[in-house]
Image: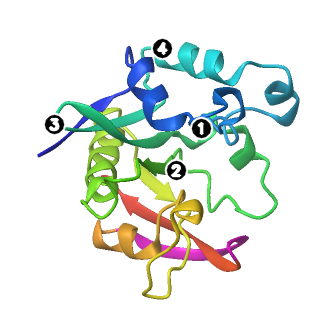
Amino acid sequence: MIEVREATGRFNDVSSVLRPRENAERACWCLTYRLSPTELAGVSRPEAMRELCERELAPGLVAYSGGEPVGWCGVGPRAAYHRLNHSRTIQKVDDQPTWSVICFVVKAGHRGEGIASRLLEEAIEFARRKGAPAIEGYPVESEGRRVSASLAFPGSTNLFERAGFTRIAPTQSTTGGKTRWIVRLDLR
């Protein structure tokens, strides 16, 4: 059974999913979309994520299998993501205060177990509990095929569509040469 919890107070669990084996500082730490390039250049990424995990509003969700942290989903108000708010390739659709699902990480050895699907289900409920009118994602068009683990961080259009999201528009962003889409689910 996969359990999913908000990341507040769970930095060690988040860290165990996000950090690479050799160099923890070089990991994305789910900060690339959150902070400006200037902020990213001058911050310890693990410490920045630790701070986010201490806030009342969790920076995302952690999935557990048998009590072991095995997955991550970065989710929050779109307004909190500097890169999305300034993006020239992932356009803002309207002024609705949507939430955004920006990434998934599933530990090797646990892929194919439905963890990303479970994380997305809980991201929807998390946004709904916090009063979001809608939630968006920016997945890659998988063309019905499996997306490599290194390119799967935004999720696939299939993943989001199975959860009830509707394609709004293609973006000008690509991952692995494949188009990324804006998908949205109304929560009202």
Left or right of residue 152: residue 188 = left
Question: Does residue 134 sit above or below 30 in this rendering?
Answer: below
- Reply above or below: 143 against 89: below
Q: Which label is found at residue 30?
A: 1
Residue drawn at 43 percent across, 44 percent down: 73
User: What element does badge 4 sit on?
Assistant: loop
Q: Is residue 38 magenta?
A: no
Q: Secondary structure at mark 2?
A: strand
The answer to which of marks 1 and 3 sits earlier in the sequence is 1
Q: Which mark is residue 66?
A: 3
**Is there CB contact under 8 Å for labels 4 and 1?**
no
**Tag 3 or tag 4, which sits nearer the N-term?**
4
Query: How far across and down, in percent of the image, does residue 96 sit?
Result: 54, 50
Q: State yes or no: discs 4 and 3 in contact (Cβ < 8 Å).
A: no
Residue depicted at x 38% and y 25%: 13
Give the residue number, with chain letter if any, for mark 4. Answer: 55
Of badges 2 and 4, the one in the foreground is: 2
- Identify residue type, mark 4: Arg
Work out whether residue 159 or residue 134 is closer to the camera in this orientation and state it: 159
Mark 2 and mark 4 lie on one chain; the one further toward the N terminus is 4
Q: Which residue is mark 2?
A: 103
Callout 1 amino acid = Cys
Residue 18: x and y, percent? 52, 36
Boundaries of the magenta span: 165-176
Q: Residue at x 45, y 19 (%)?
A: 11
Q: How far apart in space, not on screen, are marks 4 and 3 (Cα)?
A: 26 Å
Q: Closer to us: mark 4 or mark 1?
A: 1
What's the CA distance linking mark 2 and mark 4?
Answer: 19 Å
Q: Is residue 139 left or right of residue 72?
A: right
